[in-house]
Image: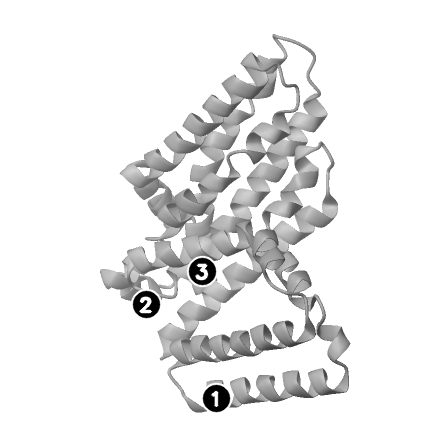
Amino acid sequence: MTAIYKKELKGYLTSMIGYVFIFFILLLEGIYFTAYNIQGAYPVFGNTLSAITFLFLILVPVLTMKTLADERRQKTDQILLTSPISVESIVVGKYLALVTVYMIPVIVICFYPLIMSKYGTVSYAMAYTAILGFAFLGFAELSIGVFLSSLTENPVIAAVLGFLVLFVCFMSQGIGSLVAETSATSLAIYMVMAAAVACLIYYMIKNILIPVVIGLAAEIVLVVLYVVDSTRFEGSFQKFLAIFDITSHFDNFTNGILDLQGLIYFLSIIVIFLFLTVQSIKKRRWS
């Protein structure tokens, strides 16, 4: 794992992608910090961090798109998969390299509250709690990007998928408000989602029987549940979308609240998507 980590970290730090990622985070944060906290004398640093989270929609997919997709495109993944290193070590090593690159701007941002203290009273507890939440938000989204990079050999497709997934997560509350909360609407959406999941399973395993069985079983269960008690579907899609609203779990941190539930949520995302990444690689390894 150490060898993979050092190789990946060196690659990111010597490529334009790593520099672009660090540059834009520090640039936008510097602009908002100057405008809000210095010139505007606004003492809450968390809101400044919250204002730049939209950057992750573009920067995270760009940073993670080559993590595993480029290995497949250049056929160098065969060298990794036949080496004495476990798949888990490969995935964790690559992920930690991404985390290290991300931590560079985060460490720089840690000095901003100290700068603010020169111009007035600053709550360090609130400021650094917000930075902690900002760090974990990035860690979680990086793990999503790594997983999506493992699904294709085209880095551009991986970047587009990353943007779409993170955009849906970022806009989940807005998307939910545009959809009617009726039972029939929720049922229709769930049936479409079940079909989409079946298609994704087929794409991953290339076996038509299993996804067809899973898809039909899911559709039947949904219809039965709707017939038995349709009221349980009212507003359920909005509640379902709330699960994927990653940025909402960052809100408490911006207000200086050390949200343990939010930390568990971010850690769960990291573990789940790294696990899915490992399974995606193993499936390809033995196929």
**Quarter of the rendering containing residue 137:** top right
Mark 3 residue element: helix
Q: Report the residue at 34% width, 66% height from top.
A: 81
Q: Position of residue 139 (x, y in %)?
A: 53, 46
Query: In this picture, is 169 found above or below 182?
Result: above
Q: Nearer the viewer, mark 2 or mark 3?
A: 3
Q: Nearer the viewer, mark 1 or mark 2?
A: 1
- Contact check, label 1 and label 2, Cβ < 8 Å: no
User: Dot 3, how many residues are within 10 Å of its Cα: few (below 14), some (14-19), or many (20+)?
Assistant: many
Name the foreground residue: 283 vs 248: 248
The Cα atoms of the two marked residues, 2 and 3, are separated by 20 Å
Q: Report the residue at 45% width, 50% height from top.
A: 95
Q: Report the residue at 63% width, 72% height from top.
A: 186
**Quarter of the rendering containing residue 121:** top right
**In this picture, residue 252 sits left or right of residue 25:** right
User: Dot 2, how many residues are within 10 Å of its Cα: few (below 14), some (14-19), or many (20+)?
Assistant: few
Q: Which residue is mark 1?
A: 212
**In this picture, residue 111 sits left or right of residue 238:** left
Mark 1 residue element: helix
Q: Which residue is mark 2?
A: 82
The Cα atoms of the two marked residues, 1 and 2, are separated by 33 Å
Mark 2 residue element: loop
Dot 2 or dot 3: first in sequence order is 2
Q: Nearer the viewer, mark 3 or mark 1?
A: 1
Q: Which residue is mark 3?
A: 147
Q: Quadrant of the C terminus?
A: bottom left
Q: Which mark is residue 102?
A: none
Q: Position of residue 82 (x, y in %)?
A: 32, 67
Q: Amino acid at mark 1?
A: Val
Q: Amino acid at mark 3?
A: Phe
